[in-house]
Image (cartoon, coloured by chain):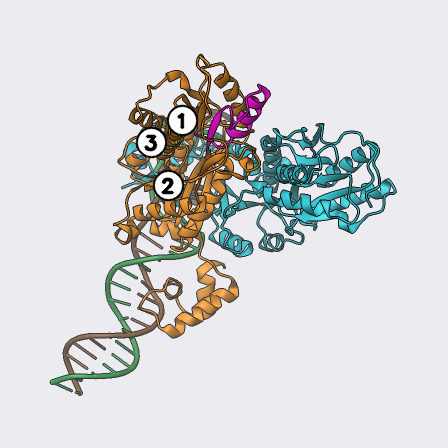
Chain colours: A orange, B cyan, C green, D brown
DNA sequence: ATGTTTCTCGAAAACGTTTTCGAAGCCTAT
DNA sequence: ATAGGCTTCGAAAACGTTTTCGAGAAACAT
């Protein structure tokens, strides 16, 4: 015999009483509660999750869906660990646990999510790598499952937390303009991630504000990898009118860009101003130091966890004043990669 | 009404029949099976996981326990994603799913694992960041739960898959000796990870083979981060007898090491030979190119998944010829950071 | 026609827990 | 002494599924 029944027999009381004692219900004598707790600790009893969640219809678990990638690391990789950490520590405070659900690179993300929803071993979801009009959002909304997206999908009837891509783009343009630049390019992700749209719109808004016309050929799509940064550099150098500055929306491209510029005899940060996106240890050794933005990813995870809690029916009223959407700020860390512009001869 | 009962009523047959039809049991008319499958697809029915696993005592889920870290990324971060990918795609072939269980940085790993074991929503575990005599191994063995460790714990009564740290260390020493070096240092992780012991033992074995005495001050502990690499460099330069070469057991330290050596006027790869550990995009831009080792992490994940499958009672006989332990090889990718040694004047 | 096998299905138990509801005991106020 | 309230506990139902076992029908062999 195992489980709560064994514990009950061992204490010579009913299983109902044991259950109530363990779950801190009110109609239990403090004396017997203490006995039960002690015996449970001794025998190492922990309630079976299947039985519990079958009865309660809840699993006390939330799933964080990510897309694991096959080979080359992208930005997201070392991004996520710190976020997990933040989310998990918030959830734990409410006796919830986080599990990460990695969608393999050879499976369709929507299929995967439907499968996970169907299996029902999580009460709520956090989805990431959000795309514009992401079909997963519609699916979760229809299924009525609490969730929050890390990244905006464009529609606003759901919760999300997202980095301030628009703000960063805008602020970067402002900074470059203030330093004398007008030919400012922007590097955008090649994939359909919505952050590309956001970054672009912030970029265009700032240009407009400064009266600088938008050149479509200055919005360059590139892979979010070291190699992507390298090809970005060559693309940049062969533009009809060579820009004097570039803003990155990814952290991993910086090193490759530096390399390809250097190889072409263009000194990064001097002949070409560069503002990176997220600060990272991988960029810390670049010379000249990359101007970029910093933020605590663990805190971002914490925020994500809190928004999620607000969506859980059991905690809804406790968190009802919490905003359902949150733009996560980043802070400029000035480097030397975007100095005041020297006089330039027109390179048209 | 929901669940299998609704489906049964809709088809006007018993729930037992529905269940058997969905689970491909033999005593079902092919005709009715087709009807059931179709109706299930139409109504979007998927079996509730709690009910199923309560009855079967199995969850068809395996948990991959990692230690999420708070802030600074370590080696492990972008290491894992590819591994997840491999594991998940192997498991999926057997109708199993992978969930990643991130142990937050502010929780004790053993406590966390016991909690996860207790909750029982996974049938088996993969544990990582294995330490020497890891208490988690003993715990899982005692609990009788199938598991495989990514990384050796030292004891051999359990399954593991591990990178060939000893081999890499040995091969690196051989290579450096062949190029004229005798004063060879080694950088080891500061933490209690067992890989440090393995790497050191390979290093010492090779030294012995070449008749080079082992100098304890040449085995340098350092953090597995960019900053760790930086301090490693300064430690290296202030040794009583400066080594002419160093072998790294971590991928992330290389950039920091290059930087600190350069700042001290010691040209990395020329005045100091360097052999890195795992090839990574972050090191690809280093100049001179870092000699290091490469391997497919996705394939490593695949191997990990297969060893795990062999541990599951339901699949044991199908995989019984599979070795329970596996040393995962890495392949040398020659760079220019460890050239033939030039004549040196003794720096003692 | 009868006995025997084969095929298909349904009734019911079982998994381990939580939770409702009523009962028993005790105390207090009348 | 009796009625009522409070405290503490136990019996039993319920969650959704799988699986065992037996029943009935059909097919087959004698």
Q: Nearer the viewer, residue B222 or B174?
A: B222
Q: Quadrant of the C terminus of chain A?
A: top left
Mark 2 is surrounded, within 10 Å at the Cα level, by few (under 14), some (14 to 19) or many (20 or more) other residues, namely some
Q: Residue at x 50, y 28 (%)?
A: A105
Mark 1 is surrounded, within 10 Å at the Cα level, by few (under 14), some (14 to 19) or many (20 or more) other residues, namely some
Q: What element does badge 3 sit on?
A: loop
What is the chain letter for disc 1? A
Q: What element does badge 2 sit on?
A: loop
What is the chain letter for disc 2? A
Q: Residue at x 55, y 27 (%)?
A: A258
Labels 1 & 3 near each other (Cβ < 8 A): no
Question: Do circles 1 and 3 both sit on a common chain?
Answer: yes
In the rendered image of this protein, does residue B83 appear above or below residue B103?
above
Question: Do circles 2 and 3 both sit on a common chain?
Answer: yes
Q: Calculate the distance from the C-alpha at mark 1 to the C-alpha at mark 3.
A: 35 Å
Q: Calculate the distance from the C-alpha at mark 2 to the C-alpha at mark 3.
A: 18 Å
Q: Residue at x 84, y 41 (%)?
A: B346
Left-right relation of A64 to A155: right
Verify whether residue A255 appears in magenta. yes
What segment carries the magenta color?
A249-276
Q: Name which quarter of the figure residue A15 lies in.
A: bottom left
The residue that label 3 is drawn on is A153
Between disc 1 and disc 2, the foreground one is 1
The first of marks 2 and 3 along the sequence is 3
Identify the disc placed on residue A329: 2
Identify the disc placed on residue A180: 1
Left-right relation of A72 to A91: right
Can residue B84 be seen by looking at this rendering? Answer: no
Q: Position of residue A322 (x, y in %)?
A: 28, 48
């Amino acid at each position: 015999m195992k489980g709560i029944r064994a514990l009950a027999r061992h204490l010579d009381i009913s299983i109902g009483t044991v259950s109530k004692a363990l779950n801190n219900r009110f109609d239990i004598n403090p004396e017997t509660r203490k006995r039960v707790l002690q015996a449970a600790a001794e025998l190492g009893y922990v309630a079976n999750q299947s039985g519990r969640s079958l009865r309660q219809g809840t699993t006390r678990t939330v799933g964080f869906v990510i897309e694991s990638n096959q080979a080359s690391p992208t930005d997201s990789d070392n991004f996520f660990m710190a976020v997990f950490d933040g989310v998990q520590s918030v959830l734990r405070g409410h006796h919830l646990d986080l599990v990460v659900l990695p969608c393999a690179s050879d499976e369709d993300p929507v299929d995967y999510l439907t499968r996970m929803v169907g299996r029902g071993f999580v009460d709520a979801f956090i989805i990431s790598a959000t795309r514009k009009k992401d079909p997963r959002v519609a699916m979760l909304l229809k299924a009525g499952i609490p969730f929050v997206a890390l990244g905006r999908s464009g529609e606003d009837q759901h919760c999300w937390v997202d980095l301030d891509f628009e703000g960063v783009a805008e602020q970067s343009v402002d900074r470059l303009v203030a330093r004398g630049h007008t030919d400012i390019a922007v590097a955008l992700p090649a994939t359909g991630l919505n952050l590309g749209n956001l970054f672009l719109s912030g970029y265009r808004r700032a240009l407009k504000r400064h009266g600088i016309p938008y050149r479509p050929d200055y919005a360059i799509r590139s892979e979010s990898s070291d190699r992507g940064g390298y090809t970005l550099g060559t693309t940049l150098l062969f533009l009809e009118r060579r820009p004097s500055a570039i803003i990155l929306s990814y952290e991993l491209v910086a090193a490759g860009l530096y390399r390809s510029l250097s190889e072409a005899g263009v000194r990064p940060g001097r002949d070409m101003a560069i503002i990176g996106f997220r600060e990272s240890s991988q960029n810390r050794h670049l010379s000249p130091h990359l101007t970029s933005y910093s933020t605590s990813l663990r805190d971002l995870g914490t925020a994500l966890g809190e928004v999620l809690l607000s969506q859980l029916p059991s905690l809804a009223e406790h968190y009802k004043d919490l905003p359902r959407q949150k733009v996560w700020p980043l802070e400029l860390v000035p480097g030397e990669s975007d100095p005041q512009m020297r006089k330039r001869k027109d390179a048209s």
